[in-house]
Amino acid sequence: MATTTGNNNNNNINTPSKSAWQSQLISPSQRLSSLLLSCRLADLTITFPNTDRQLKVHRLVLAMSSPVFEAMLYGPLAEEGPEVSLAEDPPEAVEWMLEYMYRGQTHMPDITICVHVYQLASKYQMEPLMALCSEYLRGNLTASNLSEMYDTAVLLDDSALLQRCAQVVSHSPTAVLTSPHLGRLTRSALIHLLIQPLHVASEVTIFQAIRNWGQAQGCGTDEMREAILEFLPQIRFLAMTTDEFVEHVMPSGVLNLHEASSILMNIKKVRDVPLPALCSQMREKRLRFDEELLRKVTLATTHNFPKTKKHTRSSNFVHSNQEQILVMNLRTAGIIQVGRLECKALNPTSGSACVTIKDSQGNIIGTTTTDGHQATFNKPVSLGGDVYSLTVAMEGHWPRGELGDFLATEDEVRLTGRVAYTEGRSGSVTLYFWSFN
């Protein structure tokens, strides 16, 4: 509060001028933001070794935001000088962290900045910021960028982020293992990744991923074995075919002649040949079509057909020798394995409905029968690299409608085509599938 004296001539001594910066700012948040932008009243300079970059800050604001900064700046061993050097902290991440401290910034520019900020938030014990970073990373995690954040998830033991990583690895193991960024992982993070369930079609994918990691560390042929030796027990060499082992493993030079010969004979199931200590005894293939790994995507047209309510509910009586188109021009980016489908239009009056999947040449690649809305195939039907159609043959009423375009996505899986559509009658088609791309 301003004070005054008895002399009227001095009434304005303690009165702020109209140009005072404080009078322009209404809220405390505006004042803090102004302090950061203008460097007014700054009493500390943050420096970074090997760079000319400096940041003018306020001790009190840093201490208010972090118990670590409070101890550094006001504790018994506090830094008393006008400068503090943050030798291990990326300047860009520190700048964003200051925006968070002063201005309440929550918008992350990209994954890389977020990973660095998350590490800083952990280092300086800023738990709300840690939660913000974890949420952002979980929401933006894909198979292609998982390698960028996996290290941080393991290092900080972020259970929620690790769970989301495990889900992505389970759905897209090949994309994760073949990522050009895999070499960024630390040893501990790579071990953590390799012990996850990796549903790959061939063990060669894992072997090549480990070799690529070694090459990313700068290892040549002579240094490769020592660099990746601790990872080799995670490879199921015995699950390889003889051709895979001879073509991909033996020429690599990772195994010596005695080890390679012993493993090869065990692959051929020659008796009484001891395995090298570095070789896993597991022969089981990793690729499994378990129920808990099933994913689903709904194929539903967004086209709005201008029909009357009465017309949309009409239907034709069809016979089992008449095939009805359920889905046509079905295309998928990548390969999926269809386990079953669900559609309300599957409602035979008598007998069963026969559901068939055909390729672009009209060849049947999968067929099953059902007496209800859900049809399950005896074995997974592989779709990818072609155009497919789904047809139904049954005795009963088939909705009279049209075909509408659809675009359906589920994480990295993308399906396009045309689906049978009758507003308020047949609903949509839901595919239950596996994808290990």
Image: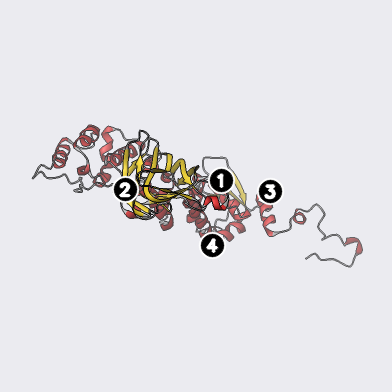
Give SS at disc 3. helix
Lower sequence index among marks 1 and 2: 1
Residue type, numbered disc 3 = Ser
- Location of residue 265 in the rendering, given as x and y in whole percent from the top left corner: 13, 39
Instruction: Write down the quadrant of residue 160 in the picture.
Output: bottom left
Q: CA distance from mark 2 to mark 4?
A: 73 Å
The residue labelled by disc 4 is 75
Give the residue type at disc 2.
Answer: Thr
Residue found at the very far left of the displayed protein: 272
Q: Secondary structure at mark 2?
A: strand
Q: Is residue 57 visible?
A: yes
Mark 1 = which residue?
305
Three-letter amino acid code of the residue under disc 4: Gly
Numbered disc 1: secondary structure = loop
Quadrant of the frame with the N terminus: bottom right
Q: Tell me, for residue 38, which label it has, or none.
A: 3
Q: Residues within 10 Å of mark 1 (few under 14, many from 20)?
A: few
